[in-house]
Image: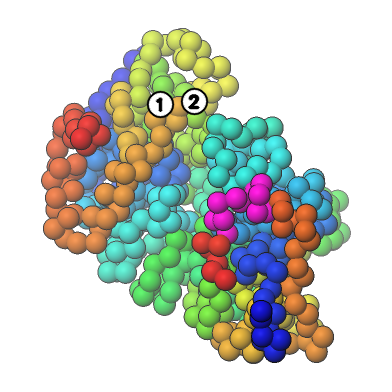
Amino acid sequence: MNKTTTVDDIVGELRSGMTIGIGGWGSRRKPMALIRALCRSDLHDLTIVAYGGPDVGLLCATGKVAKVVCGFVTLDSIALDPHWRAARQHGNVEVMEVDEGMFFQGLQAAAWRVPFLPTRAGLGSDVLTINPDLRLVRSPYGADSPYCADPADADVDLVAMPALHLDAALVHTNRADTAGNGQILSPDAFFDPLFLGAADRRFLTTERIVENGKLTDEGPISTVVIHRLMTDGVAETPGGAHFTANPPDYGRDESFQKEYAASAGDPVEWETFAQRYLFVTEDEYQAHVAERRTP
Amino acid sequence: MSDQSAPSEPPCSRAESCVIACADAWRNAGEVMASPFGNIPSLGARLAKVTFAPDLVLTDGEAALMIGAPPLTTRPDALVREAAMPYRSVFDVVWSGRRHIMMMASQIDRDGNQNISAIGPHAHPKVQLVGVRGAPGNSVNHPTSYWVPDHTVRTFVEHVDVVSGVGYARAAAAGAGATRFHDVRRVVSNLGVFDFATPDHTMRLHSFHPGTTVDDIVNATGFALTIPDDVAETRLPTPEELELLRTVLDPGSLRDREVKS
């Protein structure tokens, strides 16, 4: 089976109002070519589920987002995405803010097709008050049960983290093959396999597509952490994670990220940024980035 | 010649006292992951590791455990790594309890609740902060300490706006699931060290840094702090610790940029 497709065709499969999971973490290996295409699209009222970085900031700044499910939104080298800060302070977006580990368990529950997973994370915190629909679950293993390993956990109340079901997941990898297997050559796969597992429609973008069976020429089999049972389409987008970090192919473009962050401060600067880097084709975007590097 | 009646100049900078106070948080920690946030806690963890806490496990800040306690500014390609530690595995460590984190706090309160989510009501924040991150889960799963580089009535508050890291009273109210592994150890600020060794687990002054006074701390704290009768100064660094800190771990003095003397 050949799953190769294009960024535009992937965006064409998405609909307004969908819940979309985005892989990566903070300002690291985000599927930015897809994010840019989403910013240019007519889509609106999306729910974005992410370990948030500039993906969340850009989609909020372009008015695509109704709700964000996250534990944070950071640019790593800049503590907080100022576009996210602006969206929150202006009250433009709803947020389901949860602990990072609860978030992990929500994806895992969706991927395992169970309605929730229990966790201590969230107990006692305002995560339970700012999300009043979250519920606790009591351990059914009381002190008299043969399965009660420790009396301290008899009848204990835990947070029932609900499954974070996704209509679609978008993930960027270093390499992928024509059949839809994905390879992550950087040291952390983050939660990308779980985003794919939690979603109905699963899309990869990648720096380079190779022939099926050739990923082991690029790195050991243990780096092919995404297999084709987890994907529906794969699009080649060199530089597709720019300006986020995507080692070993490239690091974060810190200078570009600063320009992005600074554009949150003033409508004129934002308009200039958006016209030059968002409302252009991906090829034009990459050309503008290259020009920016050569003084 | 100095005036005999003037207070004696501390033999180390304020930042160095803070590093020592952070390092001591990991004393007797054993083989656990130390996860420091901020340069001063990072220096504290490294100093502890090269002196009295050699079994501490430190990460490279990305996705691996690193060997030793290299200088803060070591280039990533010069670090020696011993094992993979991607974020997914970090949660395994968090939930196993084999970790002592020192997080920062935009606000901290008398009960040891921490806020890194938002200032003002969460639904309409006056100032959006980074988000609760892992604070709710960290604080109910393993020892947790906090670093506050700017101790004022705006950071040490009666009640934090959004409870991210869970303090003692909130954990107790949530029940055994929350209290079983809950252990908020200490708070280090630019003025002093604080713990919760009071009958109701509210914050107590543990020590004041050289160059500050108890009054300075009381005036900068937005709630009633327990002040023991015999409260002492934060201990001074040993000559060996000071040497390691100044010449090996932080020769460029990032510490003095985080906290001014």
Which residue is identified by label 2? A185
Q: Chain of mark 1?
A: A
Q: On the picture, is B184 further left or further right than A188?
A: right
Q: Quadrant of the N terminus of chain A?
A: top left
Report x, y in % for residue A27.
Answer: 40, 44
- Amino acid carrying mark 1 in the image: Asp
In which quadrant of the rendered view does residue A176 lie?
top left
Say whether residue B251 is magenta. yes
> How crowded is the residue under tag 1: few (<14 C-alpha within 10 Å), some, or many (20+)?
some
Q: Nearer the viewer, residue B193 or B251?
A: B251
Residue at the spot 28% in from the left edge and 36% down from the top edge: A34
Q: Please report the bounds of the magenta region as a residue range.
A: B245-255
- Amino acid carrying mark 2 in the image: Leu
Which residue is identified by label 1? A249
What numbered label is drawn on residue B131? none
Q: Are marks 1 and 2 in contact (CB under 8 Å)?
A: yes
Residue at the spot 77% in from the left edge and 58% down from the top edge: B239
Q: Which residue is most to the front? A: B1
Vertical relation: A248 (above or below) A117: above
Residue A74 visible somewhere in the drawing: yes
> How crowded is the residue under tag 2: few (<14 C-alpha within 10 Å), some, or many (20+)?
many
